[in-house]
Image (cartoon, rainbow, N blue to C red):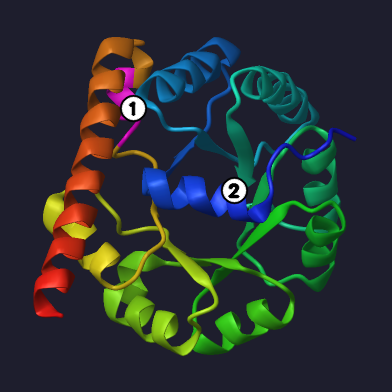
Amino acid sequence: MHQTLTTSDELLMLLKENGVIPFFNHQDADILLQILKILDRCGCRVFEIAHPRDARGLRLFAWLAEHARNMNMLLGVGTVPDASQASRFIQAGAQFIASPFLHKDTAKVCHDHQVVWMPGCTSCDDVARARELGAVVVSVVPGNILGPDFLREVTIAYPDLFFIPSGGVTRAENNLKRWFDAGALCVRLGESLFAKQDVAVKDWVKLEHNITKALQGIRHVKTSILKNKAITL
């Protein structure tokens, strides 16, 4: 088993600093490595891979995790369905696990290995249950259905938890503003960062430009929100 390279507090600090979890997956190892290098150059040290469904995907993840460690990047896995899969990916080097389900066994595996568990929640009852199971970071899914009003509600009800909206989040300034104003720790972005057409032709320059612009846009939105709150106070 690989030793976890980060504590929960350090991961939270990075998520808050970056304002985003880039979410991506591909079967081509070279493409995954190029994306990892681009994120590193852009100063984004967190990367989430969609859960690979087979043994080859697990081996590919373990290979990528080695590169991530050498680059001081934090690599996690998303949409992990159960505890056995969580255990496999933790042993392969995952430093956080995002799960769409509130499985007690998955929570235990992550806690036992001191790996951050990010369960998906669709209601206030889900959030309460996630908290009981020891979650500190919660994914709000689907974001496009629940919306920023739900996020604002749970951030007020559970000030000791951190929330990440998934789905319905874009790079548009007004969209980002609504989520961060509602209290999001960060946002999860996939297609809006990694456009299929750019990935298909391996246009690394354009991808790096888009990721840089997205990070700048997020920083601008968060700064403007803080300034407005300071003026209000």
Identity of the residue drawn at 60% across and 35% down? 74
Task: State the CA–CA distance, disc 1 to disc 2.
Answer: 31 Å
Q: Quadrant of the N terminus?
A: top right
Q: Classify mark 2: helix, strand or loop.
A: helix
Left or right: residue 41 versus residue 84 is: left
Residue 229 placement (x, y as % from top left): 17, 72
Identity of the residue drawn at 77% across and 40% down? 4
Left or right: residue 206 versus residue 18 is: left
Q: Amino acid at mark 1?
A: Lys
Q: Is residue 208 magenta?
A: no
Question: Residue 133 sits in which quadrant?
Answer: bottom right
**Residue 212 vertical placement versus 32 (above, below):** below
Neighbour class for label 2 at 10 Å: few (<14), some, many (≥20)?
Answer: few
Q: Which residue is mark 1?
A: 196
Left or right: residue 172 versus residue 28 is: left
Q: Amino acid at mark 2?
A: Glu
Q: Is residue 194 magenta?
A: yes
Residue 47 placement (x, y as % from top left): 52, 36
Residue 75 placement (x, y as % from top left): 62, 35
Neighbour class for label 1 at 10 Å: few (<14), some, many (≥20)?
Answer: few
Q: Classify mark 1: helix, strand or loop.
A: helix
Depth check, front residue: 228 or 88: 228
Identity of the residue drawn at 69% across and 27% down? 61
Q: What's the magenta region?
A: 193-198
Q: Which residue is mark 2?
A: 10
